[in-house]
Every structure is written in C-alpha cells, then in structure tokens.
Image (cartoon, grey):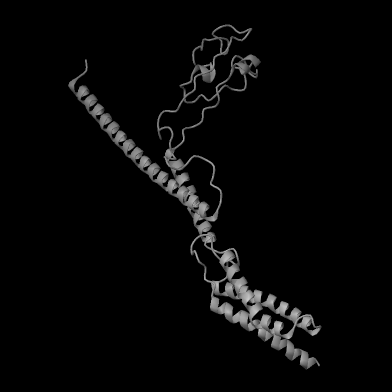
Amino acid sequence: MSTYEEYAALARHLAVRQRAGEQDAAAEAARRRDLDAAVEYLDRRLVAQGQRLDHLGRTIGAPPASGPPLSGPLLSGPPLSGPPVVEPPVSGPPVSGLPLGHPGGGPETGTGTDGGAAAAPGRPDVGAYPSTGVGGSGRALPVAVAAAGVPAQRTGQVDPATELELARRWADEADRHGQRAELLAQQPVLLPTWSPMARAAVVYLGFAAVSVVLMLVMVLASGVGVVGLGTLYAWMCAGLPAVSLIGGWLVLGRWGRPAVGAATPPRYPVLGFLLCFLAVPLAYCGYLLIFRTLR
C-alpha cells in the first residue's frame, strides 16, 4: 500500500503541475492580448493609409481603387491561435482485387499503423500517402485510389506574431511610398526641381523670346512696306510684351501649380513685367545697332 509520503509527493507534484498550467495559461492570455492589440493598431494604421491614399487620389484626379471600402476591420478572420484544422479523409469505393480491411481496399481503416494519412489523421508524423504502395515495396498506388481522392499534405501552423511583423513591415514600406508620392504631388508639372522664381523667369523669358522673333518678322515686313512704322512701334512697345506677360502668367497658373499644397502658385508679375517689357525694346535696339554696324 502507498504511504503518506507518496501521497504528499503526489500532491506536491500535482500542485506544481497546476501552478505551471496556470502560468502557461496566463502567459498565453497575455500573448493573445498583445496580439489583439497589435492587430487593432495595424488595422487603424491601414485604414488611415487607405483614407490618405484615397484623398491623394481624389486630389490628383486619379480614379478610385476598386475594392471594398476601408470602413471596417481589415484583419478579420479566424482566431490567432488554436488547434490546426485536420481535413477528414476522403472515402471512396473499394478497389477491385483488394480485400476489405486492406489499406485503400474499403471503408475500414485497419490498425492505424499502415493505413497512411487517412488511417491515422491525428498522428503528427503522418503527412500524406507515400508515392509507393503500402503492401509491397516499389509498387505505385492503384489508379482507383488516386481517383478516389488522397488527402493533401498538411501545412504547418502559421505563427501569428511572425505574420503581424511582416504586415507591420509592409505597412512601413507603404508609408514610405506614400510620403514619396505626397512629395512628388507637391511638385508642379513644369520644371518640378526648379525654384518658383527660376521657373517664372524661364517662362517669361521664353515668351519674351517668341515676342522678339515676332518683332523681327514685323521689322522685315516694315522694310518691304507691309507693316507701318506706327504699328511696328505699338506692337513692339506694348502689344508683344503684354501678350508675353499674359502668356507666361497663364502657363505658370496652369502647369506651375502642384497637385497638392498651395492653391495659387507664385507667378512673380513684377519680374514678368520687367522681362517682357524690356526684352522686346532692347532686342529692337540691338537689331538696329547690329544693322548699322554691318552697314
């Protein structure tokens, strides 16, 4: 018969096992709380990313992305942890030529040691049916067994913490790409890497150059009597510079505006006035000087 010391040792052992089980349960509960908090945080972060990208797309005029709206939890699904789901074996008709009770020969599963994955679905070391028959070495499974259906290889359980870490890394990558897209959207289409003043100066000088070319054409037309001298001076001093200033103003307002950010881009009208109203008369004076020097 068992003595009192044996009963006390058994009681102490059971108490230790109980405390270990309680500690494991508490650790598992804390782990699940941490995972749930991480899922909730990642869910809010992905929703905010989706809303920011939708706002950016509406701002730049891009069509909305197809898919469900980001108004609910994005990481919905089965519980984070739990026993793996084991699919039941697929039963089929008996194979001709094999007795009942033989592996693959009927509804009986045998002893569970030589019946393959369908005979022992709970064994952790059993994956799927082997490529050769069970009854003999080197024999392939009959065609009827393959046609009846063989359970697929069971995959290992996915670690939720690893998946959440991968999702967090992809969210960080999405944030970096989103910030880069916002920086690109804050740059105008016309000369995006230039400063606003340099961009305005180039635009006004370009229109002034076109006006100078038109002025030279009008000077040649005046030399043959097609354009009068008063008309030439009027276009040279007022008409062509005003057209250049208005053209540069419109171009800067249309293509010098970023997709997001400032609603009215700086167009520097004083700089445009100086460049446009001085370029054409100075070009005419230079033309006269060169023409008289060559004569």
- The outermost residue toward the left is 4
- Quadrant the N terminus occupies: top left
Q: Nearer the viewer, residue 239 or 204?
A: 239
Query: Residue 20: x, y in percent?
Result: 29, 33
In this rendering, is residue 137 above or below 205? above
Q: Is residue 6 left or right of residue 95?
A: left
Give the residue drawn at x 62%, y 18%. Answer: 146
Quadrant (top left/top right/bottom left/bottom right) for the C terminus: bottom right
Q: To which quarter of the image does residue 137 belong?
A: top right
- For the point 59% across and 63% down, the residue is 189
Would you place residue 183 above or below residue 222 in this image?
Answer: above
Which of these two is toward me, 216 or 200? Answer: 216
The image quadrant that residue 289 belongs to is bottom right
User: Residue at point 51% right, 58% down?
Assistant: 182
The percent coordinates of residue 104 (x first, y second) are 57, 13
Horizontal and vertical percent position of residue 42:
41, 45
- Residue 3 lies, with reference to residue 182, above or below; the image says above
- The residue lying toward the viewer, choosing from 151 and 225, is 225
| 39 with respect to 226 (left or right) | left
Q: Give the quadrant of residue 128.
A: top right
Q: Position of residue 98 (x, y in %)?
A: 61, 8
Can you say whether 258 is above or below 221 in the image? above
